[in-house]
Image (cartoon, coloured by chain):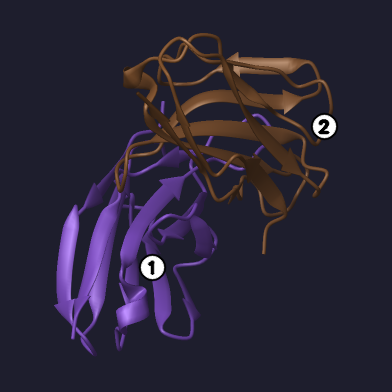
Chain colours: A brown, B purple
Amino acid sequence: EADIYQTPRYLVIGTGKKITLECSQTMGHDKMYWYQQDPGMELHLIHYSYGVNSTEKGDLSSESTVSRIRTEHFPLTLESARPSHTSQYLCASSDRNSYSGNTIYFGEGSWLTVV
Amino acid sequence: GENVEQHPSTLSVQEGDSAVIKCTYSDSASNYFPWYKQELGKGPQLIIDIRSNVGEKKDQRIAVTLNKTAKHFSLHITETQPEDSAVYFCAASPLGSASKIIFGSGTRLSIRP
């Protein structure tokens, strides 16, 4: 069982509001990721980090931003939510130095609905 | 860069029958191939993985085969049960700290009672 936690699990918010999705992992993993996924659909990488103070854009363009001030914490922020941001956001992590290579462990996801 | 194609996108099998999901990849440097299962309302969970130095790996009712020459790998589920209903993702990655993992587009597996 992976020790990676996301809050909130479900969020309904009005257009124009600022939101932050929290993600924490207790495995000491260097690499962390945010994926965006519509129900049952493809996983789209939107942000990743290889360690503290490292953040990179993923393959899918996103208006969200991320920060990595602590190893265990990788929050995602939307400054002004829009209905097009409605989706599931999955946080994940992996161990840079593990023999398991790039085994990724996912959180349970945050379901965001913007009305 | 790496590209992973997954087929079929949906699969329905009778309970007790076998299910096979196939993936192909493009980057010959890829040598790590995990499979993830995503149940409704949850995040994907690793169910089995294989490295390029082996051709097959089994874990109870699930098995994965790898053909490096043809650049394809498959997930086999035998004696399917209702709890096998989920979305399955294959992925490919070169081993290495700076490597990104590339996911297939997913297969929705339904088990008919």
Q: Amino acid at mark 1?
A: Thr
Q: Quadrant of the N terminus of chain A?
A: bottom right
- Are the residues flagged by discs 2 and 1 from a single subunit? no
According to the picture, the residue beneath numbered tag 2 turns out to be A71
Q: Quadrant of the C terminus of chain A?
A: top left
A24 relative to B52, above or below = above
Q: Amino acid at mark 2?
A: Thr
Residue A99: give x, y in percent of width and height. Answer: 73, 53
One can see residue B20 in this view: yes
Q: Which mark is residue B65?
A: 1
> In screen coordinates, is A52 left or right of B97?
right
Q: Residue at x 41, y 77 (%)?
A: B62
Q: Looking at the image, which is closer to me, B37 or B78?
A: B37
> In screen coordinates, is B92 left or right of B6?
right
- Dot 2 falls on which chain? A
Q: Residue at x 48, y 86 (%)?
A: B60
